[in-house]
């Protein structure tokens, strides 16, 4: 049976108005960052085992380039105002995506939402935004997890439900509110920005949409970076915050673990029957300022067009790839008919790659 082609109809982005530049952090705070465990993620290789893979060598070289920069390449990031919640951002991004897609809320059959900062536990953001958007009650609504890999995991679910006929059009929303999870004296507080993105997907003409996909899970990296209470359970008394719980695993996740990106992209390309030299655009996670460039060279698609958002938006976790796609479309870097490769990874750790032909046909 012929598989229904699923592609992107429209994108939406919401970035808070407040721009936080590097001079927001006091000089005495910044001076201390080099001595913390977070600051030592980019320390020199500790032994030959860290240099066993091509990916690890490339990552360590890239990190060394920014070792003297306490902000690790970030110059600006957006921050939510005190009275804003992630659902506020998600609603605005979703409204823009629907408008850009030319799709009415009543036409959405599937709504998937992912956030690192839900308004409440046990009460999904997706239900509140569903109501605010006026989506039909029959719309299948689900809060998903995936952190930095949120969008590609949502796309995998949406593609299957649309291909099977259980849904016709889907709305996928991603948000990051990391400014609320990092203490100002933590060096990681400078790496992240707040944002929400939304993507409307549905059936497209044959030859367009998703052609290849690949996913990978490495549970050995579980617990490297978390949100909780250091030394306690997250539901004990205290302020929940994001932190590196296992520095050794965090180090491994950004060195040897990153080598898997080559395998995951090559697997998606193989399924799509697309050669690396045929790729027109590369959209990647923006976990670090060097992440896109390193993975693009590692995979062998350095010729492909791309955009970077890290320096002016920080890492927006699951919103990174949709933000990049939105920016690339707006700038004209991504055009209908382009063969695009998307790749991201999330703590846990989960990696995904999708190969698609951009546009509806």
Image: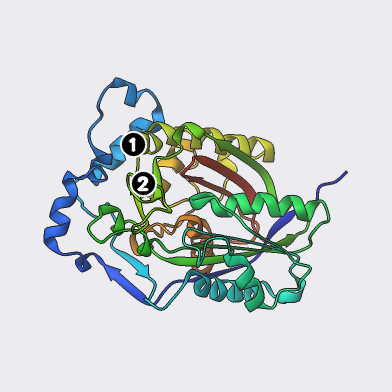
Q: Nearer the viewer, residue 207 or 161?
A: 161
Q: Residues within 10 Å of mark 1 (few under 14, many from 20)?
A: many
Pointer 1 residue: 251
Q: Residues within 10 Å of mark 2 (few under 14, many from 20)?
A: few
Q: Where is residue 140, by image quadrant?
A: bottom right
Residue 47 position in % (x across, y down): 26, 23
Residue 19 position in % (x across, y down): 32, 72
Q: Does residue 284 appear in this view?
A: no
Q: Nearer the viewer, residue 218 or 269?
A: 218
> In this rendering, which labeled residue sits more in front, label 1 or label 2?
2
Q: Where is residue 22, by image quadrant?
A: bottom left
Considering the numbered disc 1 on the image, is that residue within a helix, a strand or a loop? Answer: helix
Pointer 2 residue: 232
Q: In the visual, does 104 lie left or right of 219?
A: right
Q: Where is residue 132, by image quadrant?
A: bottom right
Where 108 sits versus 223, above or below?
below
Marks 1 and 2, the one that precedes in the sequence: 2
């Amino acid at each position: 049976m012929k598989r229904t082609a699923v592609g992107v109809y429209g994108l939406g982005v919401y970035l808070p108005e407040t721009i936080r530049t590097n001079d927001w952090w006091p000089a005495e705070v910044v001076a201390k960052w080099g001595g913390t465990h977070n600051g030592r993620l980019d320390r020199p290789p500790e032994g030959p085992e860290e240099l066993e893979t091509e990916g690890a060598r490339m990552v360590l070289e890239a990190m060394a380039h920014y070792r003297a920069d306490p902000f690790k390449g970030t110059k600006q990031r957006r921050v939510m105002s005190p009275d804003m919640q992630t659902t506020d951002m998600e609603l605005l991004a979703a409204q823009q995506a629907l408008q850009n897609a030319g799709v009415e809320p009543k036409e959405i059959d599937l709504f998937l939402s992912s956030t690192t900062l839900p308004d409440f536990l046990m009460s999904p953001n997706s239900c509140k935004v569903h109501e605010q958007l006026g989506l039909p009650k029959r719309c299948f609504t689900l809060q998903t997890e995936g952190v930095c890999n949120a969008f590609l995991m949502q796309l995998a679910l949406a593609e299957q439900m649309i291909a099977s006929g259980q849904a016709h059009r889907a709305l996928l929303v991603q948000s990051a509110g990391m400014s609320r999870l990092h203490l100002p004296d933590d060096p990681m507080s400078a790496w992240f920005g707040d944002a929400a993105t939304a993507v409307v997907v549905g059936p497209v003409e044959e030859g367009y949409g998703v052609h290849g996909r690949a996913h990978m899970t490495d549970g050995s990296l579980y617990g490297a970076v978390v949100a909780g209470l250091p030394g306690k359970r997250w539901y004990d008394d205290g302020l929940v915050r994001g932190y590196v719980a296992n520095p050794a695993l965090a180090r491994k996740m950004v060195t040897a673990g990153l080598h898997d990106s080559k395998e995951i992209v090559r697997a998606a390309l193989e399924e799509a029957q697309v050669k690396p030299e045929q790729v027109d655009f590369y959209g990647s996670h923006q976990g670090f300022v060097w992440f896109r460039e390193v993975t693009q060279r590692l995979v062998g698609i350095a010729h492909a067009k791309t955009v970077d958002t890290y320096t002016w938006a920080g890492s927006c976790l699951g919103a990174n790839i949709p933000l990049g796609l939105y920016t690339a479309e707006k700038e004209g870097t991504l055009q209908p008919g382009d063969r695009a490769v998307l790749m991201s990874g999330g703590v846990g750790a989960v990696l995904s790659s999708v190969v698609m032909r951009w546009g509806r046909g």
